[in-house]
Amino acid sequence: MTDFTRTRAFFHLPENLIYMDGNSLGPLPRRDMERLSCTVEKEWGEMLIRAWNRAGWMELPDCVGDRIAGLIGAPKGSVAVGETLSIKVYQALSAALSLRPERKVILSDSGNFPSDLYIAQGLIDMLGRGHQLKIVRPEEVAEEIDAIGEDLAALLLTEVDYRTGRRHDMAALTQRAHRKGALAIWDLAHSAGALPVDVTTAEADFAVGCTYKYLNGGPGAPAFIHVAERHIRHISPALQGWLGHADPFAFESDYRPAEGIARMRVGTPPILQLAALDAALEIWEEVDIHKLRARAIALSELFIARVEARCPMLALASPREPEERGSQVSFRFKEGYAAMQAIIDRGVIGDFRAPDIMRFGITPLYLDEADMEKAARIIADVMNNRLWDAPEYRARAPVT
């Protein structure tokens, strides 16, 4: 049984601060400090280039990929790690379109992360083959799959909405797409490490995600891509990188894809970032994701109840039913940016998403009932006394 009073000690967290932004950037795991010190001083510092062999640097993406596979219900050897999430979205979507060359429609929704949509638009423009990106409201996706029918090439959806926390039914929508002969690509940026994910049972064709949110890999931590085994041998990657080659150190002029998921690797592994991520993922060896999910729901329900009772000016933006949302709670407020800055200034860190969303991540690894109670009291003080209504809280920073 997971002891959540113990997991809090795994993280470096400043005193007198309630951190509710792990859905944007996870806190620093204490074990990362020792791991990075070893990687920098003993491996890079003493071994120099020999560390690629002696310290296992070249195999590190595979090891990290297998750790992530266990968290998303994927088999070992089916997850590649490296580069950014935008690149992984590009890889997945371009591969999906190559597997359905006669189909022209990519279906997404207005709750998707804009970067995923930018990638789709750019790929369509580059291909110049008449593809169309169709964007509908989240609740219209299922109906639209049926309406598009045999021209649907791929779904491109984020399981948990980055703004409201609304959650799609991955298995149901994937099954619906498959009935029409289409493929399903799932962005797990707000799912992996937050709730149970099973891409195998859901029969997802592709899954991608970042690792700096609930997986606590650190700022700029590398992203991942999963490809279902039934597809991988049929994919010739659009980004034919050096380390996706069957024999990188043969230095052949022509590209030959590696066997399996290794063909989805692109460039040189970011070793320092991978070392930090690898250490952070060790935490999950001691955490039952189902117990974490149950506790996250309990904490979320407590937080919602306390905030709604004290702050009638805040409107719940997240779904009311806990199973319909991820591990975050969002409220709408016209002056949400200023309000969030005032709340942060008083020791509760959440964040803001335009135009009016105040987001709070609920992460049981380091949050408990006392944190929910105290955070709600601070939020109520800020809101009821209009402490946010000050010029310094209205000045927009580059990152919101």
Image (cartoon, helix red, strand yellow):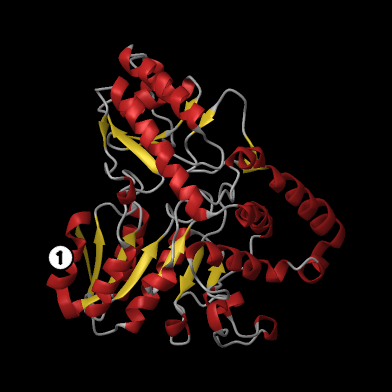
Q: Look at 36% across and 36% down and name the residue there.
A: 301
The residue where tag 1 is placed is: 143
Left or right of 332? Residue 148 is left
Please, what is the three-letter code of the amino acid marked with disc 1? Glu
Q: Look at 55% across and 63% down and name the residue there.
A: 68
Position of residue 210 measured from the top left corner of the image (x, y, whole percent):
49, 56
Secondary structure of the residue carrying numbered label 1: helix
Position of residue 123 measured from the top left corner of the image (x, y, whole percent):
34, 69
Q: Can you name the residue that lies furthest to the left here?
A: 147
Q: Quadrant of residue 266?
A: bottom right
Give whichever of 367, 290 is nearer the camera: 290
Position of residue 58 measured from the top left corner of the image (x, y, whole percent):
70, 70
Q: Is residue 268 visible?
A: no
Q: Look at 50% across and 27% down and name the residue there.
A: 370
State which quarter of the image contains the C terminus.
top left
Q: Is residue 374 visible?
A: yes
Q: Quadrant of residue 300?
A: top left
Q: Eyeballing the image, is 298 above or below 132?
A: above
Position of residue 213 measured from the top left corner of the image (x, y, whole percent):
50, 48
Q: Eyeballing the image, is 66 above or below 367?
A: below
Q: Eyeballing the image, is 347 above or below 198?
A: above
Left or right of 182? Residue 381 is right
